[in-house]
Image (spheres, rainbow, N blue to C red):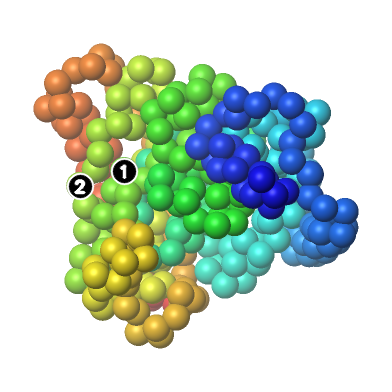
Amino acid sequence: MSVGHACHARARASADGPSRRRGRWCKEPPMLENVTDRVKKGLREWTDRLANTEQKQRLHGLSRPGNEYGVDPFGFDLDYSLSAVAPLLWLYRNYFRVETFGIENVPAGRVLLVSNHSGQLPMDGAMIGVAMMLDASPSRVIRSMVEKWVSSLPYVSTFMARVGQIVGTPENCRRLLESEEAILVFPEGTRGINKLWPQRYQLQEFGLGFMRLALETNTPIVPVAVIGAEEQAPALMDLKPVAKLLGFPSFPITPTGLPIPLPTKYRIYFGEPLHFSGRPDDEDSELDKKVRTVKASIQSMLHQGLKERQGVFW
């Protein structure tokens, strides 16, 4: 197996969960390693230029336990993430001009952030992540649960693992919650992010898995509503045959024809924590009642936010 294939294989393992191999992490060839270091340094300098004094303190104050290489059991690398956040910080401040409401509702310790999902591109998750680093108190890194098919994408799986994103299996989520992490969940999955324009801001069916984990681990749920992502890349149609051919969940056709989001104004609402009691192995009908409570809270915030906003781009 070549060095490149070996790196890719280990990155895939990191994205799916804790690696079973406890030896050395795969190193890049010297020339590539030097280029990577220069890019990371440049991105870190960009981050420092974009962030104000308080934001710099927040970013540099983030801590994450890791092994001797600075990587946690899932492949998360804080130093890598602080480099990768530079373009996201620019998007957060200058492109989407994100405003947050109620972020003080997010408690310390283990928590499930349950959000609506939209926009064809997962910018909503990225902006929630930046908000938690820059505007939450204390600042923290959230771990997003991503679809299993994401880990099959070349290079993307490596990037996702290093910035702390995890394939959304119950075991992965359980382990992170037991470590007092903040987990971002999109119960609509691809049903939400790939909605067509006529279904904008209409919540799709929620899965029950997040509620089972909340009950099992005694974790509070903070409902989150994102306004602005629906309009960033409105899908006029979904070419299912093309999506199937490429192995994607969908192949949306947008007005621009390009996978570039429009500069819509983002507003992110964090609701008050919801606490539930019951057994994780209760009947689906009982779990669904609890899930509907979360869904209703998100839908209510969406309605209120849409009523209050003055326009899509400002």
Q: Mark 1 points at which residue?
A: 187
Across and down, in percent, residue 185 comes to 40, 41
Write the residue at 62% across / 61% down: 88
- Farthest residue toward the front? 1
Crowd class of label 2 (few under 14; some 14 to 19; many from 20; radius 10 Å): few
Task: Kindly identify the amino acid type of the residue bearing the numbered disc 2.
Answer: Glu
| Side of 76 relative to 83 (left or right) | left
Q: Which mark is residue 205?
A: 2
Q: Circle 1 sits in a helix, a strand or a loop, which is it?
A: loop
Alpha carbon of mark 1 to alpha carbon of mark 2: how far? 8 Å
Write the residue at 25% across / 39% down: 207
Q: Residue 307 carries which label?
A: none
Across and down, in percent, residue 129 comes to 55, 49
- Evaluate whether residue 233 shows in this view: yes
Among the two numbered marks 1 and 2 on one chain, the one whose residue lies closer to the N terminus = 1
Quadrant occupied by the N terminus: top right
Q: In this view, does 127 lie above or below 25?
A: below
| Side of 226 relative to 211 (left or right) | right
Write the residue at 48% across / 61% down: 123
Task: Kindly identify the amino acid type of the residue bearing the numbered disc 1.
Answer: Pro
208 or 132: nearer the eye?
208
208 or 114: nearer the eye?
208
